[in-house]
Amino acid sequence: MASETASEILVASNRGPVSYALGEDGSLEARRGGGGLVSGLSAIGPDAGAVWVCAALGEGDREAVRRGAGEPGVRMLDIPSEVQDAAYNGIANSVLWFLHHMLWQTPLEPVFDTGFRQRWEAYRAYNRAFARALAAEAAPGAAVLIQDYHLALAPGMLRELRQDLRIGHFSHTPWAPPEYFRVLPDDVAEELVWGMLGADQLGFLTQRWATAFSRCAAVDPERIIPMMPNPARGSWIEHSPTGRQPFRRTWIGVHGLGADAEFLRARSHEPDVEERMAALRTEIGTAPGGGPRKTIVRVDRTELSKNIVRGLLAYRTLLEDRPEWRERVVHLAFAYPSRQDLEVYRAYTAEAYRLAEEINAEYGTEDWTPVVLHVKDDFARSLAAYRLADVALVNPIRDGMNLVAKEVPVVSDAGCALVLSREAGAYEELGGDAVVVNPYDVTGTARALHEALTMPDAERADRSKRLAAAGTALPPQRWFLEQLEALRAMGA
């Protein structure tokens, strides 16, 4: 049942647009978030009365909920910390993230034991809390846009509570192919598919990920019928839990989130970015005989899927096989720690740092540091590196999209060459003008780096312009509105 102040537009995600820090004196400090979803939601304007349902992620958030100190338009859920931890770290990040990025070492993992079942029940409870909150906040016939793998069950749970709502779900990650998806216990795989099919509309970043979901759903042809009536309009899946009429229809859409060119170009010329550029130029130094060194730039979180270690190995191979690049190129590697509460991420981060130090010890000279590694997240410094980039290295093992691949060509002062993994979602849009690599092939990536470094200036500039145009074709505001408009056009 809707509340008296029910909303016509609702967004649900694990992380919200604001977080709170608790000071030593008990005061609360609100910190605004960023990202494509925040930018996208701003497109509907403050008068739309949208509500964002999210989780309280820390003690500051929980205290804000207890004090009723939340901001207008944000409904923060104080889910018990043990439930949240089991759902978020135990299932979303340790199972579903690994599943869709195909990162398991299958001789040893995963292990679906009693502990997994307990964590799965917490994941259900977590999704149920969101479904109930959305049901309470939504006006009759409201549009609800649920985000990502953390909330894959919420569409189905919400559908059971509110048949009248128009429900969308967007996946910001890849979707596993059916042969990998079925590593999950059969009942869990089925529950995930049916949870997603509670939506009227499912959105994916690329056609590849949309097709993978449709193929996963097609394993039950008596109850689930994927259809492709017209690729220009998208596809749909007809389904019925009982296999009897009437079948419901879920539309499958592809919305390739792009970079915000206007914001990036303006932000990248602010004074703090200019300061970071000066500092980076000092770290890069000059080549023997004078003149600037070439720069290979990567900006990533130290997530397992980003393939930072193989990128460093490829750079070392470049220096081994092409000694002419020694002292004439610098690898600006920004590897910002991520998910350090998980041991496998801590170990991976440590290995990336160790390898960077090893390359510097092996090849560095008194006035040349081959790898300039920064580990503290600094957006202004990232933009400075974008502007200095001759080559951008984006080589993920598997990535839903990868906005860095779209952002660097927009910001680069002289135009940059893009070395891009064919396993990044961005490959569908940018592959024609990138130097494409197999992310597992270290020697192939080293050859690609050499090709990118030696690309003629005019060709690099032309490619960079085309990359920037393709990468900004669907900026966050239009990306969000495109989905919202499609959902509003549907019947309940």
Image (cartoon, rainbow, N blue to C red):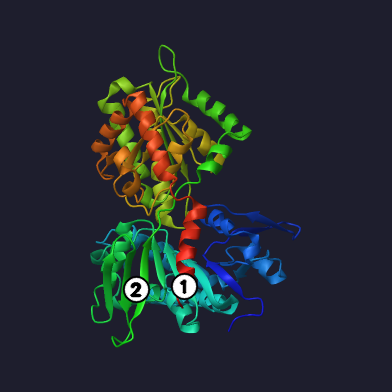
Residue 102 seen in render: no
**In front of the other: label 1 or label 2?**
1
Q: Quadrant of residue 263?
A: top right
Report the residue that reaches farthest toward the right: 25
Numbered marks: total: 2
Q: Which amino acid does label 2 sit on?
A: Val
Q: How far apart, in angstroms, are the residues tagged by discs 1 and 2? A: 15 Å
User: Quick one: which residue is furthest to the top in this view?
Assistant: 289
Q: Front-most of 151 and 200?
A: 200
Q: Between 306 and 468, which is closer to the camera in this rendering? A: 468
Q: What element carries label 2?
A: helix
Residue pictured at 74% horizontal, 61% vertical = 26
The quadrant holding residue 115 is: bottom left
Q: Which of 111 and 441 is in front in this view?
A: 441
Crowdedness near tag 1: few (<14), some (14–19) or many (≥20) residues, C-alpha within 10 Å: many
- Measured as percent of width and height from the top left, residue 442 is found at 26, 39
Q: Is mark 1 on a helix, strand or loop?
A: strand
Residue 224 lies, in percent from the top left, at 28, 77
Picture coordinates of residue 372, whole percent (x, y): 45, 32
Where 112 falls versus 438 (above or below)?
A: below
Mark 1 touching mark 2, by CB under 8 A?
no
Q: Residues within 10 Å of mark 2 (few under 14, many from 20)?
A: some
In this view of the protein, can residue 443 be seen by the observer?
yes
Residue sitting at x 27%, y 41%? 437
Residue at which label 2 appears: 193
Residue type at numbered disc 1: Ile
Which is more N-terminal, label 2 or label 1? 1
Q: In the image, is 175 to the left or to the right of 69?
A: left
Q: Mark 1 points at which residue?
A: 167
